[in-house]
């Protein structure tokens, strides 16, 4: 197989790569790998992990022991948002950033923003709502993260007043992480304010055929 992806179904970062590959129409071999999740859910709740990530072979590819990692015909890369940028440059610059350096940078900025501003509160919210054993969850922490996330989603809400998609009036690679984040945000059983621009955006991104790859709710709330 020319293209391999190591990841796990409930990993939002793995889902980003699945979405990117679906947009590009690239076929790949999917290798289930994780230290924290397995076929019966989370290790924290007594499940057995998919494994692989602790093997010397995997660590040689990705010293962090995290997912996703790709091997594209011998070229190995980890760090989900770097993988998205690589895939766009290598396979379809027009689709991913209209083959425009400035749009590339504007879209890359949103990838970094997602990593730095959006993932930490979202990760902690999911942990304290769903993934930790009930005895380790904190309702206060979950609520603080929910409030922090509302602040961050308000930034998106404002941006979507200016542009139809995140970085432009058309779809770009910036919309890959945001598709996952908006979907997860919508599936969470929490109170959130109305955000009409995000609602419109969510309806738009759900219409893309690639969305079918990551639409199953169990990929987002299991654990
Ligand atoms: N910044 C890295 C973070 C990678 C990461 O932390 N991945 C999570 C899954 S979303 C992971 O590997 N968790 C541990 C595991 O499943 O073993 C990226 O974006 O690729």
Image (spheres, helix red, strand yellow):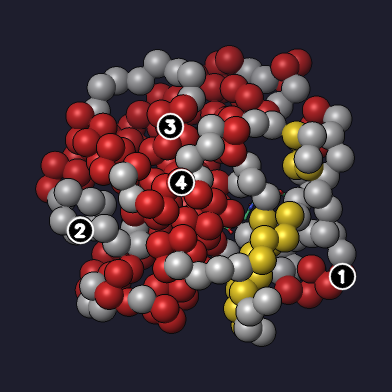
Q: Quadrant of the N terminus?
A: bottom right
Picture disc at residue 185: 3
- Tell me, yes or no, whether the two marked residues, 1 and 4, touch with CB atoms within 8 Å: no
Using the image, determine if residue 7 lies above or below residue 223: below
Q: Earlier in the sequence, mark 1 or mark 2?
A: 1
| Position of residue 216 in the picture relative to residue 159 (left or right) | right
**Residue 144 seen anywhere in this rendered image of the structure:** no
Please provide percent x and percent y for residue 188. Answer: 48, 25
Which disc, if any, is residue 56?
1
28 or 92: nearer the viewer: 28
At horizontal 54% and vertical 22% (from top left) the residue drawn is 142
The image's mark for residue 212 is 4
Callout 1: few (<14), some (14-19), or many (20+) C-alpha neighbours within 10 Å?
A: few
Separation of residues labelled 3 and 2 (CA atoms): 22 Å
> From the viewer's perspective, is 64 left or right of 45?
left
Circle 4/circle 2 CB separation < 8 Å:
no
Work out whether mark 4 precedes mark 2 in sequence or the reverse, and give the earlier one.
Answer: 2
Gap between marks 4 and 2, in whole Å? Answer: 20 Å
Residue 43 in the figure: left or right of residue 141: right
- Looking at the rendered image, the disc whose residue lies closer to the viewer, 1 or 4, is 4
User: Neighbour class for label 4 at 10 Å: few (<14), some, many (≥20)?
Assistant: few
Give the foreground label among 4 and 2: 4
Residue denoted by label 2: 170
Secondary element under disc 1, as helix, strand or loop, is: helix
**Cα separation between marks 1 and 3:** 36 Å
């Amino acid at each position: 197989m020319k293209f391999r992806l190591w990841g796990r179904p409930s990993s939002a970062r793995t889902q980003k790569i699945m979405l990117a590959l679906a947009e590009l129409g690239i076929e790949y071999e999917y290798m289930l790998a994780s230290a924290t999740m397995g076929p019966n859910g989370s290790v924290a709740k007594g499940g057995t992990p998919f494994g692989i990530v602790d093997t010397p072979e995997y660590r040689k590819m990705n010293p962090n022991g995290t997912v996703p990692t790709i091997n594209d015909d011998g070229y190995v890369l980890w760090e989900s948002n770097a993988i998205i940028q690589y895939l766009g440059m290598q396979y379809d610059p027009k689709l991913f950033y209209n083959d425009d350096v400035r749009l590339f940078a504007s879209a890359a900025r949103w990838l970094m923003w997602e990593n730095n501003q959006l993932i930490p509160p979202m990760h902690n919210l999911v942990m304290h709502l769903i993934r930790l054993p009930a005895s380790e969850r904190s309702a206060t922490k979950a609520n603080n993260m929910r409030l922090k996330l509302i602040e961050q989603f308000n930034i998106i809400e404002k941006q979507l007043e200016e542009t139809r998609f995140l970085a432009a009036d058309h779809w770009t690679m910036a919309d890959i992480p945001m598709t996952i984040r908006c979907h997860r945000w919508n599936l969470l059983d929490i109170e959130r304010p109305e955000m009409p621009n995000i609602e419109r955006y969510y309806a738009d991104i759900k219409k893309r055929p690639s969305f079918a790859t990551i639409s199953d709710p169990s990929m987002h709330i299991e654990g």
